[in-house]
Image (cartoon, helix red, strand yellow):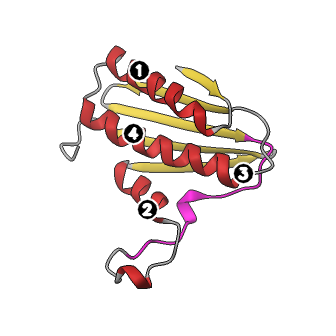
Amino acid sequence: MERRFKRKMDALDDIFTFISEFGAENGVSEGHMFKLSLAIEELFVNMVRHNVGGGREILIGLEKAGESLTVSLTDSDVEPFDITEADEYDTGRPLNERPIGRLGVHLVKRMVDKINYEYKNRQSKITLIKDLGNANV
């Protein structure tokens, strides 16, 4: 299931509806869908805020195959940002010593089991994979 969303913050309500409908149609637990919703929200917001050259809509894809759920976010006409190479965020440091930003990417990495990144012809695609059989909801 795929759908395009305007690269505006007010598209988030439509995105949450899309995600919720997919979860209900595919029997995905609320716990898994909550984590994926947070991850999708974080990545979508980052694309809108930081991929300033992107003028097109953002494509979000959801697919369930067995006990695996794949989410993809594709943004066009943008510079690359490989989330898989983003610096780790040290949550053990005191709050006043932590850098501003990067916490959202850290959380996304903790909510899914695998992240892939592709960049070709000014198109950035982030793919998240969640093992639905994983008891760590």
Relative height, residue 78 to residue 12 (above, below): below
Relative height, residue 85 to residue 93 (above, below): above
- The disc, 3 or 4, on the residue closer to the chain's N-terminal end is 4
Q: Is residue 35 left or right of residue 10?
A: left
Mark carried by residue 51? 3
What's the CA distance linking mark 4 and mark 1? 11 Å
Q: Which residues are drawn in magenta? A: 76-90
Query: Disc 4 residue type?
Result: Leu
Q: Which residue is mark 2?
A: 106
What's the CA distance linking mark 3 and mark 4? 21 Å
What's the CA distance linking mark 2 and mark 1? 25 Å
Mark carried by residue 97? none
Mark carried by residue 36? 4
- The disc, 3 or 1, on the residue closer to the chain's N-terminal end is 1
What's the CA distance linking mark 2 and mark 4? 14 Å
Residue 103 inside the magenta-drawn segment: no
